[in-house]
Image (spheres, rainbow, N blue to C red):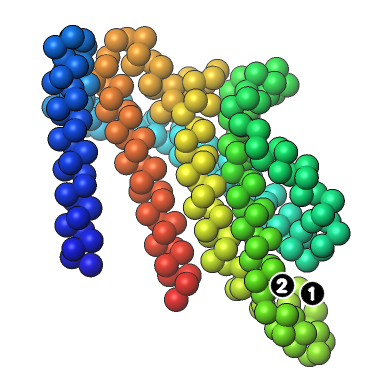
Amino acid sequence: MKQKYLLGAGGLLSLFAIWQGGALLLAKSVPIATSLAPQATFESFWWLFSSGEIIPHITASLRRIAVGLGTALLVGVPLGLALGFSKKLEMWCTPSFQLLRMISPLSWMPIVVMLLGVGDLPVYFLLAFASVWSLIISTTAGVKSIDPQWLLLSRSMAASKTETLCKIVVPAIGSHVLTGLRVSMGIAWVVLVPCEMLGVNEGLGYFILDTRDRLAYSELMAAVVIIGLIGWGLDSLLRFALAKGGK
């Protein structure tokens, strides 16, 4: 375990050195690169948090992620259960789902804005659309992995559908759903930033556009680092939950 953390720290230090070296090289031909260097970035990073400037934007982004992922869970898990238990429904839906899954969520942005207007609603829709497919696939796979003997035992003991669902199905598919949620969260977090560049006045994506317009490039780079750290933290929480669920 100690070696794992040492190697991870070494990798981060290597990334930091590449960042610093790249900024120094670029600064010779592109003076603006000095604003993107680690020192300027971390000075802005500290100021953004100490002044509270970035907090409303982080809060807005996390709220949108929560709503988008929550919607995807409410839609994806029941659909995955239905597909897992019904072979005919799976054959009926799979071609359509595969077609929709392969369309970039960002390609829907102009259409969604025309239909839903600007604001949070189109962002919620795009995040849910982007993240629902992994949940459907993982839940379906979880249902198919259930030992048929357990379902047969449930029927032989005259268990109701609700009892079977709560006592057998849900515990069996829990790790699959968490894995799908982890994938979905990663997709949603990546999609969030460009979505927030569209008709909203807060959020990390909006903040990046704002810093660009203000020519505050060190703040822009600090926002990029913040996005990476928050995404890493969210993924770590889900990995922790997955590890606990697997025990």
Above or below, 90 against 204 in this view is: below
> Residue sitting at 35 percent across and 48 percent down?
233
Whole-percent x, y for residue 191 in the image = 51, 33
Q: CA distance from mark 1 to mark 2?
A: 6 Å
Please name the residue that numbered disc 1 is placed on.
161
Could you say where residue 164 lies in the image, as x and y percent from the top left? 73, 77
User: Left of 87 or right of it: where is 19?
Assistant: left
> Would you say 242 lies left or right of 167 here?
left
Q: Residue at x 42, y 67 (%)?
A: 243
Q: Please state the horizontal and vertical placement of residue 189, each as a whole percent of the image.
A: 47, 38
Tag 1–tag 2 contact (CB < 8 Å): yes
Q: In the rendered image of this protein, does residue 132 appear above or below residue 120?
A: below
Q: As shown in the figure, which amino acid type bears the numbered disc 1?
A: Lys
Q: Residues within 10 Å of mark 2 (few under 14, many from 20)?
A: some
Examine the rendering and report whether any part of residue 239 can be seen. yes
Compared to residue 54, the image places residue 62 above or below, namely: below
Label 1: few (<14), some (14–19) or many (≥20) C-alpha neighbours in 10 Å? few
Please tell me which residue lies in front, 119 or 194. 194
User: Where does residue 179 sit, x and y in percent of width and height?
Assistant: 52, 58
Tell me the element at label 2: helix
- Amino acid on which the number 2 mark rests in the picture: Leu
Image position of 229 with respect to 244: above or below: above
Q: Which residue is at 19% across, 33% downward?
A: 18
Q: Which residue is mark 2?
A: 165
Residue 63 appearing in the image: no
